[in-house]
Amino acid sequence: MHKDEEPFGGKVFALSGDFRQFLPVVKKGTPADTTDACLKSSTLWPHFQQVHLTENMRVRTAENSSTAEEMREFSDFLLQVGEGRHEGHLVLGKEYMKLPGNTVIPNPVGDPDEDEEIVLGAIPKGMTRLIDHINCDGRVLRQSDHLDNNQRSGSQNQCSCCGSLTDEAREYLSTDSVEDAVNGDFFEPKVLHAVNLNGNPPHKLMLKKGIPIMMMRNLNPDLGPCNGTRLRIEDLKDHVTHATIMTGERKGQHVLFPRIVFISDNDASDIPFRLRRKAFPVQSAFAVPSTKPKAKRFSTSGCIWQLHASRMLYVALSRVSERSSFKALIENAKEEEDGGVYTENIVYRQIFE
């Protein structure tokens, strides 16, 4: 650039990020591979001047000194979780941390109502009546969320939440085919319908008027609808969906969107073909992957904890501003003690060295 031998041609670049959150995804990679893929492993890293954020903005918004102290303690707790500095378990290992009993929803073995428990823990009672009334302002839906770190169980919980609403549901089925012209007729339609990929809508999409949904593609970022936008359904038609944006500067803005085409990346999936799926670019947002709302804050949040991946617990906990607003249903909890449970918190501590 301009024949300048300096990094980036001597231009100033400002980068922002949080190494306590999700690190780069290396398919089938080891912890060392993940660390090597980080910016800190780049030869350019020594050229960056690091500026750390030190002022706790949550504490500044506290209504009184008692609330401020509670927020300060919760923020310190989040830092310990994100950096792996929490107290571990003598037998299970230092990667296991204790969640207090008041943040954990009981999960008895074989309990058929465990999905109902997490719904009640994450969504206030009376939400169904609020949605059914035409004058509902959507405040409950905007400020509450249910996180799930497993796509399949997340879909099940979407159905559980959606089924609790009294309005009539509409079922939308995608049109699936194989992008490769050579192998286009080799796979039966039912095989294609059974494929669920991250970032793509499912084959069967159940929607109801009034439910929250999340956009899965950038339709028109300049006008509002982009990947991650939360909306509320106003009306459902055969070929178009009418919704309003629930949060942000464009709250209340009406959006109409049709079915669009999704083509899978063969390098990012384990299926032997590129799936071509035409469907509405949304998913119901009662339950969203814990990776989705990284920049969002909710008044209440519920989390179903099944798989173990680096930073997931930190991201889930940081969606709320106070400890009492977080509820977790942990299916693989270890060593229930003193009213709390131990769960795995995988942190690659070498990234902070």
Image: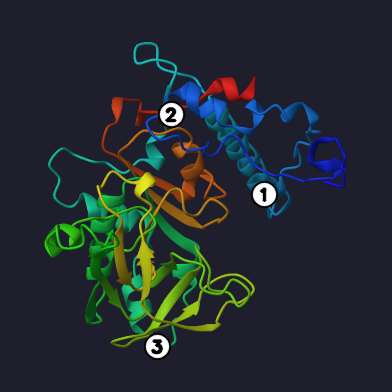
Q: Earlier in the sequence, mark 1 or mark 3?
A: 1
Q: Dot 2: few (<14), some (14–19), or many (≥20) neighbours within 10 Å? A: many
**Residue type indicated by callout 3:** Ile
Identify which residue is drawn at 45% across, 34% down.
Answer: 26
Query: In screen coordinates, is 25 left or right of 3?
Result: left
Q: Which residue is mark 2?
A: 345
Q: Nearer the viewer, mark 2 or mark 1?
A: 2
Q: Nearer the viewer, mark 2 or mark 3?
A: 2
Q: Earlier in the sequence, mark 2 or mark 3?
A: 3
CA separation, marks 1 and 3?
Answer: 34 Å
Identify which residue is drawn at 67% across, 45% down.
Answer: 68
Q: Is residue 278 above or below residue 20?
A: below
**Residue type indicated by callout 2:** Asn
Mark 2 element type: loop
**Residue type indicated by callout 1:** Arg
Q: Dot 1: few (<14), some (14–19), or many (≥20) neighbours within 10 Å? A: few
Q: Which residue is mark 1?
A: 58
CA separation, marks 2 and 3?
Answer: 43 Å
Task: Name the residue at the front extreme.
Answer: 182
Q: Which residue is mark 3?
A: 134
Identify which residue is drawn at 33% across, 63% down.
Answer: 201
Query: In screen coordinates, is 328 left or right of 253?
Result: left
Q: Nearer the viewer, residue 281 or 167?
A: 281
Identify which residue is drawn at 40% across, 40% down.
Answer: 102
